Amino acid sequence: MSISKIRIENVTPEIAKEYLGNNAENQRKISLVIVKSLTKEIAMNKWLLSNDALVFCNDKLLNGQHRLSAVIESGKPCEFCVLTVDDDKIMHIMDGGKPRNISDVIRIEGLGYSKAIASASTWILGYKRNALTTLNNLMRNTTTSQSRFVSRSEQVDFCLRYGGRLEVACKGITALYDEYGTATPSMMIAVWFLISEKHSEKKANEFAEVLYSGEGYNRGSVKPLRIMLFKNSTTRRKLPRPAVFGLMIKTFNSWIQGTVPGTLKLAINEDFPVLHQ
């Protein structure tokens, strides 16, 4: 295989349509979620020129259909590296490496606990965008409005902006989890962060301590949740993770008010819980 041409091109929506009109046969099915995420990146002026080229062979597009679709959806031109080759077998090795996920990106930027922070940020942003239901986190769903949809760069920016506070949360929650078990660290880190915003880091630390240890102020409030978390960890039919997150918020509301919750559950059509003052 040889490279006959490589260039940087400003691809307009019109050019993108032309290129997609020459898409190679048997391409992967387009992921609407990926296109939606890329479209939002472009709309927010987060697009950057990448080494991941649009690739052509014999005038057929071999690589770049999602990005070109996003250019069309956004209505904005974007710069691309464009590569022309003479052998379509290059498709056999495209995207064969390990993609960098969000935890990889923020670790490169120097954040510790990168996996836990990336996971916790999914819950935090889903909550902040009102994208959580008792069954799903819809922050990256094809039916989610653009205002609620969370793009990759938005999530990375959030992790880096609040990285210091999230590292503090990770350190404390990880220590509690190692000692007591109980609540999944990533969810509790997210709950800790949201409580610290609504109330204070002190209140977030107090609630985490009571939840994990079962001891302290108004410990009766957290007992139903502790029992549920234990049962959920030992059964094969687990509760949906968003429901568990919602029950953690519901439990905090009881704890902060000094009350004991009745039956700890969420109905399928129930509005997702929000933190009380």
Image (tube, grey):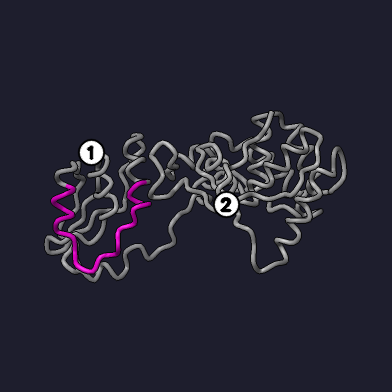
52 sits to left or right of 10: right
State the separation of the CA atoms marked 1 and 2: 38 Å
187 sits to left or right of 215: left
Residue drawn at point x = 37 percent, y = 52 percent? 33
Secondary structure under badge 2?
A: loop
Q: Amino acid at mark 1?
A: Gly
Range drawn in magenta: 16-36
The quarter of the displayed image where residue 110 is located: top right
Badge 2: residue crowd in 10 Å (few <14, some 14–19, many ≥20): few
> Magenta segment: does it hold 35?
yes
User: Whole-percent x and y of residue 202?
Assistant: 76, 32
| Count of marks, rendered view | 2
Do the residues under discs 1 and 2 have CB atoms within 8 angstroms? Answer: no
| 61 lies above or below 72 | below
Residue drawn at point x = 15 percent, y = 46 percent? 15
The quarter of the displayed image where residue 248 is located: top right
User: Whole-percent x and y of residue 215?
Assistant: 87, 45
Secondary structure under badge 1?
A: loop
User: Whole-percent x and y of residue 52?
Assistant: 31, 53
Q: Amino acid at mark 2?
A: Ile
Numbered label attached to residue 268: 2
Query: Which label's residue is closer to the chain start, 1 or 2?
Result: 1
Residue 269 vs residue 277, the one in the foreground: 269
Numbered label attached to residue 75: 1
Q: Quadrant of the N terminus?
A: bottom left
Numbered label attached to residue 17: none
Q: In this rendering, which labeled residue sits more in front, label 1 or label 2? A: 2
Residue 194 vs residue 108, the one in the foreground: 194
Q: Quadrant of the C terminus?
A: top right
3 sits to left or right of 193: left
> Magenta segment: does it hold 121?
no
| 203 lies above or below 241 | above
